Amino acid sequence: MTDSNPKADIKRVDPTMNPSKANPKLSKEQQQVFIDANTPRRNDPEATSWHDTVYQILSSTWLVSVLSVVFAFIIGGILIIAANAEVHVAAEHFTENPGGFFAVCWDTFAKAYFSLFSGSVLNFNGADFAKMIEPLTSTLTRATPLIFAGLGLAVGFKASLFNIGGQGQIVMGALLSALIGFSFDLPAGLLLPMCVIGGFVGGAFWGFIPGILKAKTQANEVIVTIMLNYVALNFIRWALLNPVYQKEGQNVPIAKPMSENAIYPKVFGAAFTTNFSFIVALIAVAVVWWLVNRSYLGFEMRAVGLNPFAAQNAGIKVNSIYLWTMIISGGLCGLAATSSVLVPGTGVSQDVASTFGFDAITVALLGRSNPIGTCLAAILFGALKAGGYVMQAQTQTPIDVVQIIQALVVMFIAAPPLVRKIFHLPQPIGKDILEEVA
Amino acid sequence: MKLELKGITKNFGDFRANDNITFTAESGKIHALLGENGAGKTTLMNILFGLLRPDAGEILIDGVVQKFSGPNDSMASGIGMVHQHFMLIPVFTVAQNLILGNEPVKSLGVIDIKTARKSVKDISDRFGFDVNADDLVEDLPVGVRQRVEIIKALSRDAEILILDEPTAVLTPQEISELIQILKQLKEAGKIIIFITHKLKEVQEVADEITIIRRGQVVGSAKPSDSESEMAALVVGRKVSLTTDKKPAQPSEVALEFKNVSLVEKTGAIRLQDISFQVRKGEILGIAGVQGNGQTELSEVLLGLLHPTQGDIVLNGKSLLKMSVKERLNEGVGFIPEDRNLYGLVEDFSVEENLVLDSFDRLPYGKFGSIKPKAIRASALDMAQKFDIRLFNVADKARSLSGGNQQKVVVARELNRPLQLFVASQPTRGLDVGSIEFIHQEIVAQRDNGLPVLIISTELDEIYDLSDRIAVMYRGHIVGIVDSSTDRSTIGLMMAGIDPSQSKTGKAA
């Protein structure tokens, strides 16, 4: 409470807070000279509420993350049962045969999740080993863009930046990656890495904009990134009708196909969809882990994220950290584009970003913005996507249930006290008590 | 009325925060609970206020055992608490805050704000609080916010008023106003429990003193007892309240401020033509009432603010064009005035905080990568050398007590090769034992031949450490005097009157 902020309006960087308001009750002279405003800045709800929420999510225990997923699946299961036609029939005969009703419920529940599992991990009915593990490779394929974009979000969270611009950064990454991919005639050993780097650079450029605006003008990155999503989306619509991108002889937005040398090779052979971008994603996990936990930049990012004032006092250039974090965050999101752009076929399309940029928020939060946790969360979400289709086909369970489960996961991880209450977990020791103990 | 605590015991895991605490407080008396940070005072008060339940022991009011299952119960029994961190909503008026959580409702669910305003006025008039019911809390200075908290407690008919470290956030003037208020409340027959670690305040305000150390009552004292007797009880050993130091051996000028001014674009003058020199081997203390430009002075020195005029020279080099990092590399050691906000990343581990400004140099980092093993080894070393009491250097800095947090900041700054040591409010909010330790460290730096600049609003601290004293008032230096100058002269200077000039005025 001794925080005083009499000089926010001078040159001091005041990254998260509003400049202190002038005090109307004081005389003009008092205002002119020295006001020990004693404004409690960190308690200013307007300034810090979402920072606090995100921080709370990221600092809760692993157990909460795991239980959130478990609980989301349980509720999802109830919805599956409620949506099932056979269950409706059995419910009508509930009074005559209650045991039968519960048997049908259990049957529906088990079948749905079994098909989800067999569609995302292991197909027990597969003719050969390749067919059996095909679902797993499908999961990894779908997880790959989420790993990249999730890492991008996670890096942002470390510096307390909320990059909602994943969508736009993916689009820009895709455009640059594709441009390189169909414009140059180079050997694969050169062209493919160039395309991957192009994806990073495209996304990084789209992260640079909110980064530089935040660094120079304290513009809120949340708002800028949201708006840049729209800019990117309209830009790709325009670009795909432009001769640079548009395939010759087309009047619809169809892009030029990639050069053969810009295609990711398959990881597990031609039979499976998983391409080399998955390996690049795993490398990115390792690099981000090093970046966050071991590099100078990561140390500075974490310090800035937790207390920009102390970081600044320790000689860390807070604004340049914001800028670099946004560049890296955007670049990782841009890499997400490469896994669907650098494939044979029609080339970049205007829905290249799908909902990866938004799903990445959930993925990074579920993974507690830890690179390995984020990777695992992305694989879980990839499995939900891969298995969802199979579940729909085999059990007529609407695929929307999968989206509901994802939404419930977000809801529960955003409310750790709720999960604790449901599972009777002990309250973590409060800050005041810790202070007293020490 | 009589409040008794009998054998209160509270454990957190293996840690016994309160061990068989017993004391009695009576109406019309101010009862001080004195103890170091972390002695268990706040736990005890949270038990009394119903926020925590004791593992053993009981609370009696007028001989009746009380069972509190929450603050509402304790409030119903007439206990009111003024927390160290105020529980007020800044955008609400005083009256709105007063009824918060207990809103009187007229018909149709309309809140009866009139009664609340009247209640603020009545209490404010009765005790001379000078609080206006319609002021927004965010516009009020801290001292007045605290009075709002007191009014809030009194409006719920509190007979027992607990104040947790009430002076920690107040300026000296506000402290004396608070003490007046407490004396009035005492005369009105309230029981006042005053929690603090400051000996001077206890002597000034308390009628009875209970001293707590490591969760136990270690004795009681009278206000007439000497400070050093009380300090010995609080800390558990004899402490020196003044720092022993040899006469300074100043050599050449190291730091020089040359006509430094800082004027905002709005025309507000923050610093005005500041000039002074600090020599190697001497301590220059900067005294002044808080908010007279000391913060700005320290920040232009570190490079957080940029002066609009003048120059700052360290060992012949101008610092002005340098970034914060470059200045730290030049050997500026800096203890910021607010350690929680500017000194520490509280959610970083202790070891990370110990390298916050040196993680990117050997032995802590190499080729862009930090070296956790080297950081750990050095942290363990520093924790021992600076007597930082902790369980584990990997624990968050947040979990340390204020004194130990400040030792982390001091250890970090002194661990680098320094050319200048600057400390702003180095012991604010610290207990006697930590103050003693930090003062000794500062004097040791001077004796090693460093130029030292101390900025403090505590005149005791200025006298205790300084070889020369500069007094700031409204952004300029009123004068620089020898530390043998008496308090009344310094006091006049703090009010902006330069005694040397007024003397010549008389002579003429």
Image: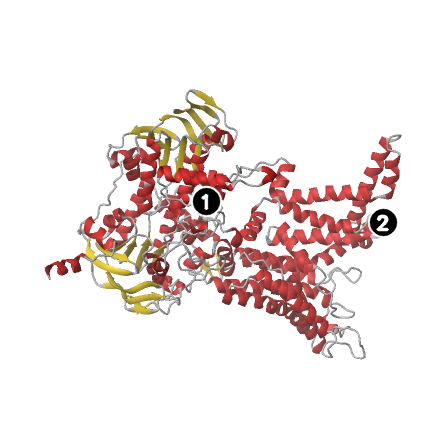
Residue A307 image point, x, y percent: 47, 54
Of residues A375 and B12, the one drawn nearer to the viewer in this rendering: B12
Residue at 21% x, 48% y: name it: B245
* Residue type beneath disc 1: Val
* Residue type beneath disc 2: Gln
Residue at 72% x, 67% y: name it: A341
Left or right: where B183 falls relative to A220? left
Farthest residue to the top: give it: B63
The chain containing the residue under callout 1 comes to B
Residue indicated by mark 1 = B94
Tell me the crowding category of disc 2: few under 14, some 14 to 19, or many 20 or more residues within 10 angstroms, Cα based. some
In the rendered image, the vertical position of residue A22 relative to residue B88, given as above or below: below
In the rendered image, the vertical position of residue B320 relative to residue B204, given as above or below: below
Farthest residue to the left: give it: B507
Residue B175 image point, x, y percent: 32, 43
Of residues A349 and A120, the one drawn nearer to the viewer in this rendering: A349
The chain containing the residue under callout 2 comes to A
* Element type at mark 1: helix
Q: Can residue B450 be seen in this view?
A: no
Residue B19 image point, x, y percent: 41, 28
Q: Which image quarter holds the C terminus of chain A?
A: top left
